[in-house]
Amino acid sequence: MYLLPAIDILGGKAVRLAKGDYDRVTVYNDDPVAQARAFEQAGAHWVHVVDLDGARSGMPENAEIVERIVAETHLMVEVGGGIRSIETLERLRAAGASRAILGTALVRDEEFARAAVERFGDFVGAGIDAKNGEAAVDGWRKGTSLAAVDLARHVAKLGYKHLVYTDIARDGMQTGIDAASYERMARAFGNPVIASGGVASIDDLCRLQRVSGCIEGVIAGRAVYEGTLDVAQACELLRGLEAGAPDALAFAEAAAESDELAKEDGAGAPESAAGASSSVR
């Protein structure tokens, strides 16, 4: 299980949306590339980049920023948003991206979804965004009347081995995660999933660890920008767990309990692991 700090790009800036609502935007950094560097310095090996403009328009609109992140860091870059053609996949692979996530195309263009996995193999992954169990498309703005678990079973049959599952109702809200929903998706998909939506603290990583056989990675956004989840601490914990360090989970649970006590005592949030380059407004 590994951490993927999120960089959602809208209008060339690193932002977060509340529940996928384009009218509820918070800008965290005017320079997504600088944000990626900050995550790398904090110890991240992966970053999850979403072209929100592309997700809405159906065309990649921030490919140059993605290319700069790849070129100017050593991060493994997972990219999603507006990927609906073989040409876009070719460009991302040539740029050095580690994985490209297809979303809307899984529902709207099965021929392309099938051709993509046949041609690119593990370079492509599936992205299923759901609210109340129903898959959503077009930047989360439209429902599909298709159960997320059924779509997971379908993309598995197409040959996809990686799946990012986002709980829209929790995304960007720091409400905590529903570990059982990721477990259900993993069982339907037949492989571990990448969990996204609602991660708020180390405590959520501990919850996911309890179903760790179902979790490949964890995407965190607002929590790392606002300092409730420290990137360095989270990466250290997950690497310790991966290496089988016997005290890693106990340490993390103790840290989570300590954080809760600090909140009850009125202590402020810890310094953001997003780095000094972040400009919150």
Image (cartoon, rainbow, N blue to C red):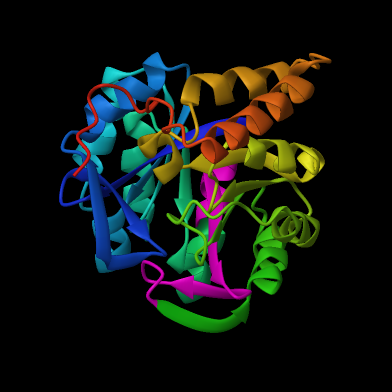
Q: Residue furthest right?
A: 246
Question: What residue do we see at 18% from left, 33% from top?
Answer: 31
- Tell me if I can see residue 221 in this picture: no
Asked if residue 214 lies left or right of residue 101, the reply is right
Asked if residue 44 lies left or right of residue 33, the reply is right
Question: What residue do we see at 75% from left, 48% from top?
Answer: 191
User: Residues in magenta?
Assistant: 116-141
Tally of numbered discs = 0
Asked if residue 113 lies left or right of residue 154, the reply is left
- Quarter of the N terminus within the rendering: top right
- Tell me if I can see residue 134 in this picture: yes
x and y percentages locating residue 83 in the rendered image: 37, 56
- Quarter of the C terminus within the rendering: top left
> Is residue 133 in the magenta section?
yes
> Is residue 240 in the magenta section?
no
Q: Quadrant of residue 55?
A: bottom left
x and y percentages locating residue 214 in the rendered image: 77, 46
Q: Residue furthest bottom?
A: 145
x and y percentages locating residue 140 in the rendered image: 41, 69
When the figure is inspected, residue 41 is found, relative to residue 168, above or below; the finding is above
Question: What residue do we see at 43% from left, 27% from top?
Answer: 270
Asked if residue 161 lies left or right of residue 184, the reply is left
x and y percentages locating residue 224 in the rendered image: 43, 35
74 or 114: nearer the eye?
Answer: 74
